Image: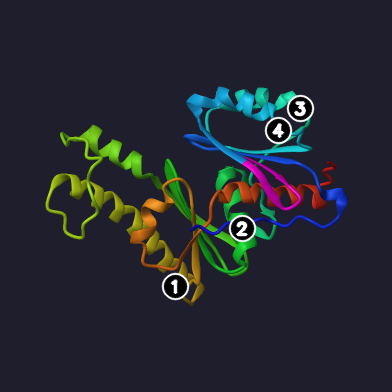
C-alpha cells in the first residue's frame, strides 16, 4: 500500500480551519478538504467533468482558504474561480518562490517553475529532509532533484505513459497496442511498445537517481514518487522508492501553513 504523509499544522485551536486544496493538472483536477491535520474528503475529476465539481463543492463546509496549484488552460482557471466563488472566501493561486518552506528554488526565474512541481518539492522536503528525487508520473513525467540542504537543483520533464504511446502510434504505422506486457526482450510488437515505454521512463528515473547520488557524493537514500501512473512503473524500478499519494495536495497544505505563519495571511 502507498504511504500517505500528512502535514501537521499546529495544535493551536486558532489554526484549526477548513482548507480546500486543489491540484489542477494537465488531465485531472484533484482536490481535498483538510482540517485539524486530516484529509476529511478527497476527489478527482477529468477536465471534461469539471461541471460535476459544483455539486461536490456545494456539499462541503465553507473553507477558510482555497489554495490552488494550476498548470492547465486559462479557461479552466476561470472555471475554477467560478466554482470556488460560492463561498466568498480567500483564494490563493500558488506561484513558485525563490525560497519557501525550507526549499531553495534553483531556477533563474523562480516563478517559471510549475506550481505543481513546487508543491511536490515542498512536500518531499517536509517528509524526508534529505537529498531526494521527486517523481510525478502523470500526463507528463517530472523528475526533480532535491539536495541534502533542501535546494532544488533542477529537474527534467518527459512525456507520460499515454503521451508516449500516442506519439509513437500517431507517427508510425504501428497498431494500437494496449494489450502489450513488459518483457526484458520482447518478441512481439505489442510487448515491444509496452516495454519500450517502461524502459524509457524507468531508465530516465534511474539515471537521474545516479546523477543526484554522484552530485551529493553518496547514494540517495530514497526517492518519492506520486501521480496516477506511478503504480504502473513501481514494479520495474530498481532504486529505493516510496510512493506517496497526492503529493501536490500535501505540499499545498504545507504552503498554507507558510502563508499563515510567514506571509501574514489571516484565516
Q: Which mark is residue 60?
A: 4
Q: Nearer the viewer, residue 85 or 125?
A: 85
Q: Are marks 2 and 3 in contact (CB under 8 Å)?
A: no
In front: mark 3 or mark 4?
4
| Residue 71 percent across, percent down from the top left | 55, 36
- Residue 265 in which image quadrant: top right
- What is the CA distance from the residue labelled 2 to the residue labelled 3? 28 Å
Secondary structure at badge 2 equals loop
Residue that label 3 marks: 87
Q: Nearer the viewer, residue 267 or 125?
A: 267
Q: Is residue 19 left or right of residue 239?
A: right
* Dot 3 alpha-carbon crowd within 10 angstroms: few under 14, some 14 to 19, many 20 or more: some
In front: mark 1 or mark 3?
3
Q: Are marks 4 and 2 in contact (CB under 8 Å)?
A: no
* Dot 4 alpha-carbon crowd within 10 angstroms: few under 14, some 14 to 19, many 20 or more: few
Residue that label 2 marks: 5
* Dot 1 alpha-carbon crowd within 10 angstroms: few under 14, some 14 to 19, many 20 or more: few
Residue that label 1 marks: 214
Amino acid at each position: 500500500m502507498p504511504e500517505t504523509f500528512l502535514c501537521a499544522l499546529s495544535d493551536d485551536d486558532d489554526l484549526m480551519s477548513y482548507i480546500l486544496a486543489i491540484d489542477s493538472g494537465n488531465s485531472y483536477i484533484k482536490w481535498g478538504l483538510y482540517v485539524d491535520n486530516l484529509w476529511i474528503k478527497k476527489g478527482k475529476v477529468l477536465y471534461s467533468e469539471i461541471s460535476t465539481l459544483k455539486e461536490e463543492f456545494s456539499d462541503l463546509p465553507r473553507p477558510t482558504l482555497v489554495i490552488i496549484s494550476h498548470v492547465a488552460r486559462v479557461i479552466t482557471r476561470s472555471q475554477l474561480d467560478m466554482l470556488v466563488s460560492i463561498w466568498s472566501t480567500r483564494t490563493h493561486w500558488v506561484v513558485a518562490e525563490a525560497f519557501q518552506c525550507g526549499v531553495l528554488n534553483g531556477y533563474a526565474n523562480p516563478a517559471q517553475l510549475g506550481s505543481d512541481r513546487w508543491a511536490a518539492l515542498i512536500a518531499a522536503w517536509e517528509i524526508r529532509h534529505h537529498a531526494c528525487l521527486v517523481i510525478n508520473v502523470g500526463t507528463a513525467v517530472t523528475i526533480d532533484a532535491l539536495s541534502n540542504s533542501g535546494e532544488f537543483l533542477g529537474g527534467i520533464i518527459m512525456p507520460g505513459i499515454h503521451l508516449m504511446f500516442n506519439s509513437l502510434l500517431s507517427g508510425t504505422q504501428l497498431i494500437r497496442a494496449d494489450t502489450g506486457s513488459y518483457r526484458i526482450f520482447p518478441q512481439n510488437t505489442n510487448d515491444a511498445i509496452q516495454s519500450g515505454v517502461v524502459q524509457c521512463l524507468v531508465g530516465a528515473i534511474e539515471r537521474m537517481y545516479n546523477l543526484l547520488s554522484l552530485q551529493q557524493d553518496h547514494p540517495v537514500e530514497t526517492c518519492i514518487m506520486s501521480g496516477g501512473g506511478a503504480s504502473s512503473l513501481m514494479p520495474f524500478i530498481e532504486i529505493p522508492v516510496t510512493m506517496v499519494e497526492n503529493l501536490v495536495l500535501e505540499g499545498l497544505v504545507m504552503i498554507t501553513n507558510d502563508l499563515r505563519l510567514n506571509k501574514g495571511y489571516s484565516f
